[in-house]
Amino acid sequence: MTTPSPYKPRAPLRPATVPTPRKQTYVLEEVRAAAIRDVLQPYFFDDKAFRDLVCEELRGPVARPRIIEFGCGTGSFTLAALATRRDAVYHGFDRSEADVAIAMCRLSRAGLHDRATFTAPFELDSRRIGEALQGLRADFLLLPRFLQTVPPLVEGAALHRVAFLAMCRQLVKPGGRMLIIEDVRGEDADEQAEMSFAWRNAFRARLTRDLETLRHALHGLDPDLAARLLRLPGDPSLLADLGDRAQPKGGHPLPLRAWERMFEHLGFAYRAERHQAQRELYLFTVRC
């Protein structure tokens, strides 16, 4: 379903029916899970430094820039991008309708909702993506931790990771930029264990520093989870549960060398910047 802003759902193919209680419960749970993820993600992923770097790129001398974002989620980068470039035309894609609903509310509160169009959920199909964009080519294409959710190999017509990246390159105008944020895995088991240990400790530190604010934010969404937070920082199982809730399912990050080989195979001219605090995160800026 394509959901332009203001939200105008497509006409149903059959007469509308009252959703069953089971369906309503499922939708509510999806929205609640997305809201919890939105609260937890800033603790799991300290994106301020990369968000600032992305916005610095967006300030380039481009009139009325067009921005495409795959994996827009609940709108963290969306809001920053549109606040930086109030003249931009924006189209965001995400697999979760619940996440996009939160993003639209966030933009509405900021008075930016009339400049954004969203497609959710969407399929990794070049024809359908092209139909949603209606010929739009981007000056800037954002991929915040999305590539890792694209399968490396697929059967049938769906796009695999390399084919998806090649399609993204075709969506960007000459002289434009692709801004890719990705996790990297360790090159071997020892390096991966070291990186995971550092990530877990940083996540726990951010949670415990802001524990009361976090408990207040979660109380209306999941009172039991808010109460369990009192067991931090000494409960490893709670920390793992919070990490699972903070990130979308289905991520398959690669070692840095594998990401680099993929970009070089595609002929991308890129610059890699490592996150100063979370050393397993990189921003790849591809010049098109």
Image: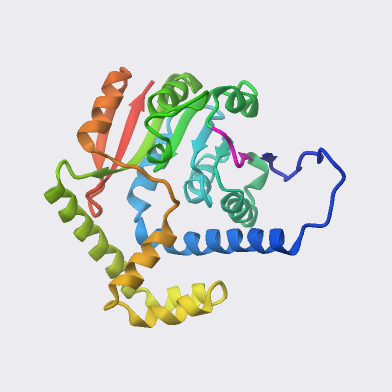
Residue in the image at 67% along x and 64% along y: 25
Q: Quadrant of residue 146?
A: top left
230 or 237: which is nearer to us?
237
Left or right, 120 with reference to 71? right
Q: Which residues are magenta?
A: 117-123
Q: Residue furthest left?
A: 190
Q: Position of residue 172 (x, y in %)?
A: 47, 22
Residue in the image at 48% along x and 47% along y: 80
Q: Position of residue 29 (x, y in %)?
A: 60, 63
Q: Position of residue 279 (x, y in %)?
A: 22, 50
Q: Quadrant of the N terminus?
A: top right
Residue in the image at 22% along x and 56% along y: 196
Q: Position of residue 129 (x, y in %)?
A: 58, 28
Q: Quadrant of residue 121?
A: top right
In reply to whether residue 235 is colored magenta, the answer given is no
219 or 240: which is nearer to us?
240
Q: Is residue 109 above or below residue 233?
A: above
